[in-house]
Image: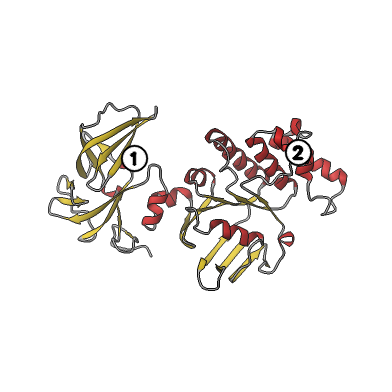
Amino acid sequence: MIKMENIAKSYDGNTMVIRDIGLEIKKGEFFVLLGPSGCGKSTLLRMIAGLEEITAGDLWIDGRHANELLPKERNLSMVFQNYALFPHMTVRDNILFGLDARKVAKKEQDERLNKVAEIMGLAEYLKRKPAQLSGGQRQRVALARSICSQTPICLMDEPLSNLDAKLRGQMRGEIRRIQRMLGLTIVYVTHDQVEAMTMGDRIMVLNEGCVQQIGEPLTVYNDPENLQVATFIGMPQMNIFRARAEQEGLRLNGSLILRRCGGQPCPAPAEECIVGIRAEHFRRGNESTGYVLEAKAAMVEYTGDETQISFENGQGYSVVKWPGQIPAEAGEALTLGVDAEHLYFFDKDTGHRIRQDGGRSQ
């Protein structure tokens, strides 16, 4: 459906803001471009749309070479962060906008409108102006306009970032439901990892214009290729320590000792490296694990369904996360266990993943 080969972008001819992107997005796939602000994800989306020129490489859409195609020739639609609705037009006219230029018959326009309005829950709002709608309703109008165009590809540039947390949650489910119902191919830009994890069939993590990893959400979460991916995916962020191998186990940040239990081998793949441990992978001290860490609680937070405890790590604070409401107090001694399979190792210089079989991710 969408194929990129060695795509690159530069505005000044010297600095590349997009570097050597190669990927294929399948028909009917929900594909997420994820990364921090300024990483190039919106630029890449605009290149697919034809709103930005491609400096190098080739773009193919439905088997057609698309580098020189005008936006209107690419048979796709786009949903923007700011909704891009016309304030002087009704919901009905906003949804149908552009169909006259495509010479779609009035009868067919009405049929499309009625179907889309029912799907999106907008039937009772068709005579209203955008100013009379809530943020979530305006976003549904923008999405309805895209659906009404009946283009098979929809590009979305952070469409939910202006909504509050409750509406974002509702709209995530709504967009995903409609995408599956209609079989749309969606390319979705976001910096929000929750959106990426819950909505995407696959995620591409970008940083400074370079692809860090492409994969299914749980694969990217459980098997990060490098330190950038490991620390960007996950809430709270993966705990990161500078590690040195010692006889007892690993000295973390020059302060804490991750001690070996029951004759376990030292887990370090190198004398010095970086080790990552996700908050939920720490277990309570009364549970049997391969390695144990003694620490002191600095802060305890209850969110209702889980407990988060921060502890000093020698260079700041790390976090453990357990389900339920665990009795604990600041200053309390903690015994934290972790198993070998939940230790993530990274090269201290490059940040590349060092796998426990000795291999390195490139």
Disc 2 crowd, CA 10 A, few/some/many (<14, 14-19, 20+): many
Q: Secondary structure at mark 1?
A: helix
Amino acid type, callout 1: Glu
Asked which quadrant contains residue 125, the reply is: top right
Disc 1 crowd, CA 10 A, few/some/many (<14, 14-19, 20+): some
Q: How far across and down, in percent of the image, does residue 191 sit?
A: 50, 49
Which residue position is annotated with label 2? 91
- Identified at 73% across, 35% down, the residue is 118
Left or right: where 35 falls relative to 107? left
- Mark identifier at residue 280: 1
Q: How far across and down, in percent of the image, does residue 269 sit?
A: 24, 59
Q: What colouring method underlies this structural image?
A: secondary structure
Residue 329 visible in this rendered orientation of the protein: yes
The extreme left residue here reads 247
Left or right: where 241 falls relative to 34? left
Distance between mark 2 and mark 1 Cα atoms: 46 Å
Amino acid type, callout 2: Val
